[in-house]
């Protein structure tokens, strides 16, 4: 178990550019979550996958945001036409569905810190 | 919608003493989970302790324990024998048991400082 990993750890981009982040969950976890955390605040939910299906999207996830989990393993979060307000830490978490004795707790990755200049 | 409130933006405690962090939440659900997460500076979020709402017994994990008051919708974290490594942001989080909606709702966090 190598834990949840995210890449890149830091990203600096100019306003208007597109960025893509990757999350690799714990291998046996079928649920994957994206959260956004701004400085001094708690994380806010963005979206959630069970296997490859995206089951819920927050209203925070504007049309410029898209997330995928094509094979039910890793996930990508893309932000198009970035704005300064997109500057934040983007956290990924994974969990099992709590069945078959699996733990339902969410385990977090180290995050990707995005700075839009 | 569920909300989680942490009314103490900052707390400090002397090393080896005990500190209690407060959390209240609002929900209309009867069954749910509550968590405390720790986020050290520039490091990732770590689960500290969890509580299932249907369990009356308060959860305990070594030096960490909770006081869960379901009727009052209160969920405080007690850290005993505080250590320097306990310094971090602490987040209270709610997870409703609604099928297909397992997102965590976080409070604003409490920054805990440990004084040597």
Image (tube, rainbow, N blue to C red):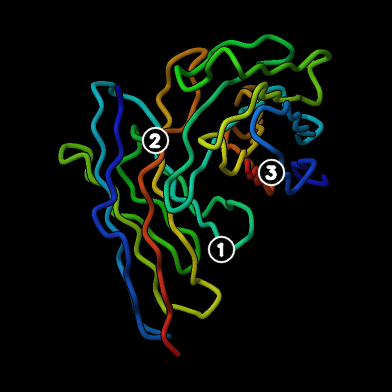
The quadrant holding residue A104 is top right
Residue nearer the viewer, A45 or A82: A82
For label 2, the residue is B94
Q: Is residue A36 left or right of residue A52?
A: left
For label 3, the residue is A112
Discs 2 and 1 carry the same chain letter: yes
Residue nearer the viewer, B70 or A31: A31
Disc 3: CA contacts within 10 A as few (<14), some (14-19) or many (>=20)? many
Q: Which chain is indicated by disc 1? A: B
The quadrant holding residue B70 is top left
Q: Residue at x 76, y 24 (%)?
A: A75
Q: Residue at x 81, y 13 (%)?
A: A70
Mark yes or no: residue B72 visible.
Answer: yes
Residue nearer the viewer, B74 or A23: A23
For label 1, the residue is B40
Q: Name the element at disc 2.
A: strand
Q: Nearer the viewer, mark 2 or mark 1?
A: 1
């Amino acid at each position: 178990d190598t834990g949840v990993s995210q890449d890149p750890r830091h990203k600096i981009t100019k306003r208007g550019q597109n960025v893509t982040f990757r999350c690799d969950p714990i291998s046996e976890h079928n649920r994957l979550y994206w959260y956004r955390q701004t400085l001094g605040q708690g994380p806010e939910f963005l979206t959630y996958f069970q296997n490859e299906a995206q089951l819920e999207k927050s209203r925070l996830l504007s049309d410029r945001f898209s997330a995928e989990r094509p094979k039910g393993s890793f996930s990508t979060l893309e932000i198009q036409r970035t704005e300064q307000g997109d500057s934040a830490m983007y956290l990924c978490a994974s969990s099992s569905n709590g069945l078959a004795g699996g733990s339902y707790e969410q385990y977090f990755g180290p995050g990707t810190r995005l700075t839009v200049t | 919608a569920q909300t989680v409130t942490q009314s103490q933006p900052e707390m400090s405690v002397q090393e080896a003493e005990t500190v209690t962090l407060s959390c209240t939440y609002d929900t209309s659900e009867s069954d749910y989970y509550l968590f405390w997460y720790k986020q050290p500076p520039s490091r990732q979020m770590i689960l500290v302790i969890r509580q299932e709402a249907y369990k009356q017994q308060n959860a305990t994990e070594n030096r960490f324990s909770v006081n869960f008051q379901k009727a009052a919708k209160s969920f405080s974290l007690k850290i005993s024998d505080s250590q320097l490594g306990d310094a971090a942001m602490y987040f209270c989080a709610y997870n409703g048991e609604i099928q297909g909606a397992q997102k965590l709702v976080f409070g604003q966090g409490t920054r805990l400082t440990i004084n040597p």
